[in-house]
């Protein structure tokens, strides 16, 4: 028979997967000899069994619960449901990872109409007994039976008003007795059945409620946001009650062993006398800072301080503890590694190394890579954020907090920004023409598009917050408003977007600036010391390259050359090239592009101080670049001196049914080799120019969307001929590298052949994911939401690499590439290159580097260190 229930005395801290975090820590504290009210944990396996059995709590689990309860009764010398000396318990959820959004605590379980009297007599404190009972009825009704607690609060408030008092503590035993009677009547009215008097039934119902709460919508959202698998399940902790509400020598509180906001090494927290746990959390009475306890009860304070220190030393991390004082005696109810701000995480990790408690590697592991986002981007003022209510949610596409007035076109964004206004650009989706408006905006909100949509990729590159694909909003760009759930937001309406959570708010929320401390540099220094993967950046202009270089990028892994034409009048030049229907016109357009490209490459080479720069040749999905409106077509026609009708016909001729699978990538360089010639000239000439100034640039030329060695060979000949010619003309020596992206499944499957020509591979996992799954990058967001809701998928494969499928192709290609060319250099430049979980995969797959947007560079450095500390490379 499987064991589904463990006494606290039977477990320890290593059993987190089975007992959940809370259960494992209660067991560990018990074995350390701390004053822990005893109890037991119903395991996470019992939870998964509950779901496997069709939401039924198996009899063997029930039997084991009551067997454990018997032991606890003996330990406490009390009996569950007893009239004279009743054992009361608390019931709490506790998953492997701490998860807000799951079931709240139920206290005082075991009370009924009879045992409440027993408790009153035993403690000689009827007020306490009835106070405990009314709390239990309300919590049980709320948490287990989902009856709104407002029903009960109204009864309490009415009594206080009748009596002319303000505080709960001013109600006496008789008041509370009367309130309990009313609670029971209200419960029966609302539920259609009496409040359960059988403590065994109360307990089983509460356990089932915890298991149910694993699947509530809040928990599901939190899990997805934090990558916690649904399959883990939650444990349930049943613990004998101690009472903080027994009178003035009792109390309850929560404390951290260090300050969780700043990391300062002082006890931090608060407590309330004559209260139970939920009073502290609910904010009904104002708690005292923990330092006050030193005056109120010096002995208990000293003992608590000592235990806090002991726990911190034992866990070698800052602890978040709950405690209760019952008639002057201290009990520890919970401890866990405390949540902290990113700033505090750095300070605590570094201090613990200084104090000799942990190693540098452990300190590195202590800071979550993703948490660095909070240091690098603006955030919302937490108080203001708590008070605000989201109006909708989209994808958390680019982190940070944005607050501004809604505008619906790039032009208005630019104008308003120039006039000193803060704006958020709201579009159904963005396209290259929006780039200047995007730069001028505090944040970007789109109604359509996924994690690799134009808005998401470009915003991340700029470090601008972006919520993409908020499917509930309807954007009317023409009439300048958006609508969500029946509410309209006109141009100028204040909105706020949280690019870290995906929430959108229909109001202004104050933001706070990012702040990087000296601790950041220390920890990043350690991360660099322990990582094996190099970290490059995806940057298309000198500005972004400089930011990335300052963040420690070791090169550019992807320069998307088509992005270089987004700004100013440049889009016209690239459109001219796209709509040219003969070589001559195309060459004319290309001649305009050449100096711009050369100058940008010079800027990027210099911004990177001569480090490697991989230039990816033009890869414009045509639908992103062709003029859309008649006005834009007219403008282009004027510029080219061609009739409007002709341009219109060309644009129509360029229409593709599947642009993402269309005339893009190396296909363009094959049909129009003059494009590859111009780009080669720009790359090489720029390198020669900067090397004359003392830099030592070795440019890397990268051909996208190759599926067949023959494609790469064709382009290679064009590139080589031009490069050799330019180098010869200049009369200098210049080394350059030629490689390819692996982003078409066939390219991965035939990587061994492709490596005959390619000196390096860069995995374009955006396209590789698109083509391996057959999910359109631009449209998948719409149905993937349904996939999550139905638990078909747990996460977005465009954000977290699908290691079983796409990852297999990557591993295969790396291996085959090395078999052909032992020193082939391999990296990744899809959006996954900045995702910590995918970075760990890249490390294990043997890649040489990851490349990500500039603001993700520090995250990638830290994630790479995590990967190498956990899975050291030989
Ligand atoms: C990719 O496909 O992963 C990639 C980096 O290229 P792009 O996103 O420009 O298609
Ligand atoms: Mg691609």
Image (cartoon, rainbow, N blue to C red):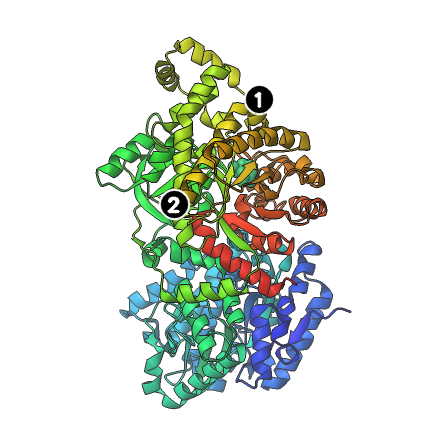
Residue 469, percent across and down? Answer: 47, 38
Picture quadrant where residue 572 is located: top left
Is 214 situated above or below 324? above
Name which residue lies at 75% across and 68% down.
2
Residue 237, percent across and down? Answer: 58, 71
Residue furthest right as drawn: 1
Report if residue 97 is visible in the image: yes
Label 1, ligand 2: CB separation under 8 Å:
no
Q: Nearer the viewer, mark 1 or mark 2?
A: 2
Residue furthest left as drawn: 419
The quadrant of the picture occupied by the N terminus is bottom right
The quadrant of the picture occupied by the C terminus is bottom right
Report if residue 399 is visible in the image: no
Residue furthest bottom as drawn: 299
Q: What kind of element bears circle 1?
A: helix
Q: What kind of element bears circle 2?
A: loop
Dot 2 alpha-carbon crowd within 10 angstroms: few under 14, some 14 to 19, many 20 or more:
few
Between 405 and 691, which is closer to the camera in this rendering?
Answer: 691
Which quarter of the rendered image does ligand 1 occupy? top right
Residue 352, percent across and down? Answer: 46, 76
Name which residue lies at 46% across and 41% down.
456
Q: Give the residue number, with chain letter if any, for mark 2.
A: 693
Confirm or deny contact between disc 1 and disc 2 (CB under 8 A): no
> Residue 80, which numbered label?
none
> Residue 671, which numbered label?
1
Dot 1 alpha-carbon crowd within 10 angstroms: few under 14, some 14 to 19, many 20 or more:
few
Between 499 and 175, which is closer to the camera in this rendering?
Answer: 499
């Amino acid at each position: 028979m499987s064991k589904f229930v463990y006494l606290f005395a039977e477990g320890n801290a290593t059993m987190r997967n089975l007992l959940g975090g809370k259960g494992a820590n209660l067991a560990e504290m018990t074995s350390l000899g701390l004053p822990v009210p005893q109890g037991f944990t119903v395991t996470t396996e019992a939870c998964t069994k509950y779901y496997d059995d069709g939401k039924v709590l198996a009899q063997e689990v029930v039997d084991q619960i009551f067997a454990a309860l018997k032991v606890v009764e003996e330990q406490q010398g009390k009996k569950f449901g007893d009239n004279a000396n009743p054992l009361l318990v608390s019931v709490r959820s506790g998953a492997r990872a701490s998860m807000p959004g799951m079931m709240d605590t139920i206290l005082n379980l075991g009370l009924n109409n009879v045992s409440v009297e027993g408790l009153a007599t035993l403690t000689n404190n009827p007020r306490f007994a009835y106070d405990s009972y009314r709390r239990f009825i309300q919590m049980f009704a709320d948490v287990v039976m989902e009856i709104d607690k407002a029903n009960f609060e109204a009864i309490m408030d009415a009594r206080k008003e009748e009596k002319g008092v303000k505080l709960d503590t001013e109600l006496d035993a008789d008041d509370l007795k009367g309130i309990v009677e009313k609670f029971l009547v209200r419960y029966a009215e609302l539920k259609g059945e009496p409040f359960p008097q059988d403590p065994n039934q109360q307990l089983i119902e509460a356990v089932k409620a915890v298991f149910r709460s694993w699947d509530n919508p809040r928990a599901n959202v939190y899990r997805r946001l934090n990558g916690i698998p649904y399959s883990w399940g939650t444990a349930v902790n049943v613990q004998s009650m101690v009472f903080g509400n027994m009178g003035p020598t009792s109390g309850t509180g929560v404390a951290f062993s260090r300050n969780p906001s700043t990391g300062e090494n002082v006890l931090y927290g608060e407590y309330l006398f004559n209260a139970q746990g939920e009073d502290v959390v609910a904010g009904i009475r104002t708690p005292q800072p923990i330092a006050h306890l030193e005056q109120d009860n010096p002995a208990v304070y000293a003992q608590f301080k000592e235990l806090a220190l002991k726990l911190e030393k034992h866990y070698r991390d800052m602890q978040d503890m709950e405690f209760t004082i019952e008639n002057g005696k201290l009990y520890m109810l919970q401890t866990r590694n405390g949540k902290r701000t990113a700033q505090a995480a750095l300070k605590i990790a570094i201090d613990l190394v200084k104090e000799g408690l942990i190693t540098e590697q452990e300190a590195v592991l202590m800071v979550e890579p993703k948490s660095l986002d909070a240091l690098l981007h603006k955030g919302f003022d937490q108080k203001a954020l708590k008070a605000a209510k989201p109006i909708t949610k989209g994808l958390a596409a680019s982190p940070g907090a944005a607050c501004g007035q809604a505008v619906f076109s790039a032009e208005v964004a630019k104008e308003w920004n120039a006039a000193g206004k803060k704006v958020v650009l709201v579009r159904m989706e963005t396209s290259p023409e929006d780039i200047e408006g995007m730069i001028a905006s505090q944040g970007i909100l789109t109604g359509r598009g996924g994690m690799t949509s134009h808005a998401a990729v470009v915003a991340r590159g700029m470090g601008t917050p972006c919520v993409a694909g908020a499917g509930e909003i309807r954007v009317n760009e023409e009439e300048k408003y958006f609508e969500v759930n029946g509410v309209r937001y006109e141009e100028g309406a204040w909105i706020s977007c949280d690019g870290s959570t995906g929430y959108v708010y229909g109001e202004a929320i104050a933001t706070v600036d990012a702040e990087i401390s000296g601790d950041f540099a220390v920890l990043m220094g350690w991360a660099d010391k322990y990582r094996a993967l190099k970290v490059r950046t995806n940057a298309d202009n000198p500005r972004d390259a400089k930011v990335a270089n300052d963040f420690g990028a070791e090169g550019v892994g992807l320069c998307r050359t088509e992005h270089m034409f987004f700004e100013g009048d440049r889009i016209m030049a690239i459109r001219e090239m796209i709509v040219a229907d003969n070589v001559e016109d195309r060459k004319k357009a290309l001649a305009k592009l050449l100096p711009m490209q050369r100058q940008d490459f010079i800027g990027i080479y210099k911004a990177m101080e001569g480090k490697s720069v991989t230039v990816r040749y033009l890869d414009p999905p045509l639908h992103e670049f062709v003029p859309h409106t008649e006005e834009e077509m007219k403008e282009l026609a004027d510029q080219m001196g061609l009739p409007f009708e002709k341009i219109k016909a060309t644009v129509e001729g360029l229409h593709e049914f599947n642009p993402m699978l269309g005339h893009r990538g190396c296909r363009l360089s094959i049909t129009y080799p003059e494009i590859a010639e111009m780009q080669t000239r720009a790359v090489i000439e720029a390198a020669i120019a900067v090397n004359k100034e003392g830099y030592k640039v070795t440019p890397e030329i990268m051909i996208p969307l190759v599926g067949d060695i023959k494609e790469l060979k064709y382009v290679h000949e064009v590139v080589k001929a031009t490069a050799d010619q330019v180098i010869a003309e200049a009369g200098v020596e210049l080394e350059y590298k030629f490689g390819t992206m692996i982003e078409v499944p066939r390219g991965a499957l035939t990587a061994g052949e492709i490596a005959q020509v390619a000196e390096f591979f860069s995995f374009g996992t955006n396209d590789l994911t698109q083509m391996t799954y057959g999910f359109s990058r631009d449209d998948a967001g719409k149905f993937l939401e349904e996939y999550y809701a139905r638990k078909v998928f747990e996460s977005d494969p465009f954000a977290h690499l699908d290691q079983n499928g796409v990852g297999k192709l990557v591993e295969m290609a790396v291996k085959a590439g090395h078999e052909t060319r032992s020193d082939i250099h391999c990296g990744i430049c899809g959006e996954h290159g900045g995702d910590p979980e995918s970075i760990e995969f890249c490390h294990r797959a043997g890649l040489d580097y990851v490349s990500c947007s500039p603001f993700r560079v520090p995250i990638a450095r830290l994630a790479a260190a995590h990967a190498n500390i956990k899975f050291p490379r030989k």
